[in-house]
Amino acid sequence: MRSAVRSHRRNRVVDVTCVTLSLLCALLLFFDSWDDPRFSTPYLGVALALAVAGSLLLGRRRQRPVLVAVLVLGVGLVTELVAAAVLVSLFTVAVHRPWRVAVALTAAHAVGSVPFAVLHPDPTLVGAGYTEVGLAVFSFVLSLVVLTPFVAWGMVVRARRELVDSLRERAERAEAEAALRADQIRGREREHIAREMHDVLAHRITLVSLHAGALEVRPDMRSEEVAEVAGTIRASAHQALEDLREILGVLRSGPGGAGPSAGGTRPQPGVADIADLVGESRAAGAVVALDDRLPEAAGALPASIGRTAYRVVQEGLTNARKHAPGHRARVLLDRTGAGELHVRVANPLAVAAAGPPAPPGARSGLVGLSERVSLAGGRIDYGARRGEGGVIDFCLEAWLPWPT
C-alpha cells in the first residue's frame, strides 16, 4: 500500500515537471520567434495558445498516451512552440504502448513536419542554397534525428519494466510453488504419521477392545479368568504405548534415523515376524490358519518389502477380528511365478451377531495400506470374493516386488 502511494506521488511530481518544462520551452521559443519575419503577431498568439494547451495535455499522458500524442503532434505540425511536448508525448507512447505505435507516430510526425518547413523556410537554410526538396529532406531527417533518441529511450524503459515485472511475477510464482510444495510435504508427513499410527496401534487397540468386550458380555466369569483377561488388556495397552514411543522416536529423529531415540528403537517387523503376529492373534482367541510357502531366501528380502508384507497381514487380521469375530482367517504367504511376494488374508463375511461391538473404522487402514504398498512398488486388491464351498470371503491381497 505504501509503495503504491509513493509511486502515485512520484508520477504526479514527474507529470507536473513535464508540464512546467514544456510551458517554459514554449515561452522561450515564443520570445525567440517574436522578431522572426516569417511569423505574424496573430500567428504567434494562436501558436502560443496551442502550445499551452498541448503542454497541459501532458497531465493526461499516462491515461491516454496515444490520444495525447496525436493531439500534441497535430499542434506540432503548425508551430514549433510545442516541440518539448512532442518529445515527452512520444516518449510516453514508447513506454506505455507497443513499439510499432511509437515508430508509426514518429514517422508520421517526421513526414508531417515537411510542409511547415517548406511553407516557412528558415532564412539561414535558404541563404545556404537549399531548394524546396532540400528543405523537405532536411526537415524530415532532422525530425528523425531529434525524435529517435527519445523514442528509443522510452522503449528501453518499457523493456526494463517488463523485465522487472516478469522477474517479480516469476519470484511470486516461485514463492507460491514453494509454499504449495511445503504444504504438500506437510500433508504427506501427516499422512505418514497417520499411517504409522494406524498400522502399529490399530492391532493393539483392537485386542484391548475385544478383551474388554468379553468382560462386558460375560459378567459371570471367574475371578481367575477376569484376572487373565485384565492382564492381557494391560499387556496389550503397555505394548501399544511402547509402539507409540517408538513411532514418536523415529519421527523426532528425522528421515535419517539419527536422533536421541533412534538408537533405542527395536528393529522393524518383517516377514519372519508374521508367524509371531499370527500367534498373538491366536492367543487373543482368534482362529487363524497360516500357510507359509515362502522359501528360506525370504529372510533376505529388503526391510521395506518385509515390513510392508507384515503390515498387510496385520491389517487383514485386525479387520477380521473387528468385522468377523469367531470366524477363521486364512493367511497365505507365497512367491508367484512372476517373482513376486504374494500376501493374502481372507475371512468369511460375517452377518450381524450378538456380542461385543466392533471397534469403529472407516476403511482408513486400507487406504493407508494401499499407499504403503504403492510406495513399495507393489499392487494391492481387496473386496468380496467367492471362496471354498461358495462362501463369500473378504480378501486382502498384495503383490510386492521380490528383488533377484
Image (cartoon, rainbow, N blue to C red):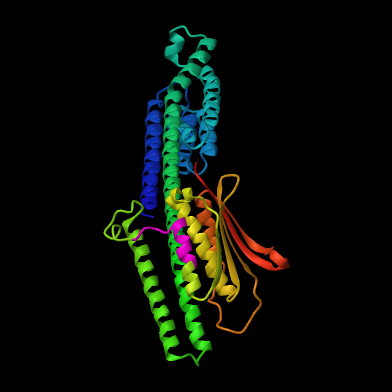
Say above or below: 72 vs 183. above
Any part of residue 78 in sight: no
Q: Say whether residue 336 is magenta.
A: no
Depth check: 119 or 389 in front? Answer: 389
Which x, y percent locates residue 244?
38, 68
Dominant SS of magenta comes to helix
Which x, y percent locates residue 138?
48, 14
Q: Check the picture and name the quadrant holding the N terminus.
A: bottom left
Most extreme residue toward the top is 129
Which x, y percent locates residue 254?
34, 55
Left or right of 143 in this view: 389: right
Q: Which residues are magenta?
A: 266-278
Rendering quarter of residue 36: top left
Left or right of 360 in this view: 352: right
| Residue at horizontal 42 percent and vertical 53 percent from the top | 182
Depth check: 52 or 176 in front? Answer: 176
